[in-house]
Amino acid sequence: MRVLNVHEAKTQLSALLAAVEEAGESFVICRNGKPVAELRPLSRQSRSVEPRADLRVRLAAEEATAPLDASDWGDLR
């Protein structure tokens, strides 16, 4: 497992994600020499849950931005 500082992780994030995705590598990210996070592949089961969560967020955003009709205003007219 490779150890990186925050600056290095930030500047190389795309390459690090590719290494995680393609080769299954893991990385520890440190701030001031102390480990604070781990970048590693998700299990297959965890990966299948994420798209559904993303769909719920998109649907909620679409609902929140849908145009209002007269019935939505109630007694505020």
Image (cartoon, rainbow, N blue to C red):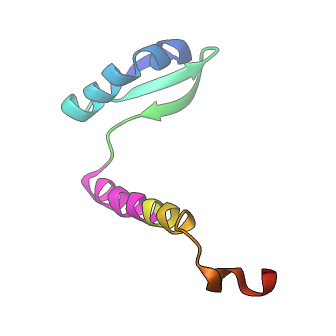
Say which quadrant the C terminus sits in: bottom right
Q: Looking at the image, is 39 positioned above or below residue 60?
A: above
Say which quadrant the N terminus sits in: top left
The image shows residue 24 at horizontal and vertical percentages of 24, 33
- The residue lying toward the viewer, choosing from 54 and 64, is 64
| Residue at (53% x, 13% y) in the render | 7
Q: Residue furthest left?
A: 22
Q: Is residue 39 left or right of residue 30?
A: left
The image shows residue 48 at horizontal and vertical percentages of 28, 59
Residue 51 lies in quadrant = bottom left
Q: Looking at the image, is 48 positioned above or below residue 33?
A: below
The image shows residue 58 at horizontal and vertical percentages of 44, 60
- The residue lying toward the viewer, choosing from 31 and 61, is 61
Q: Is residue 58 left or right of residue 23?
A: right
| Residue at (35% x, 29% y) in the render | 26
Residue 40 lies in quadrant = top left
Q: Is residue 52 left or right of residue 32?
A: left
Residue 35 among magenta residues = no
Prevalent SS, magenta region: helix
| Residue at (50% x, 24% y) in the render | 29
**Number of marks drawn:** 0
Q: Residue furthest right?
A: 76
| Residue at (46% x, 26% y) in the render | 28
Q: Looking at the image, is 58 positioned above or below residue 16?
A: below
Residue 50 among magenta residues = yes
Q: Which residues are magenta?
A: 43-56
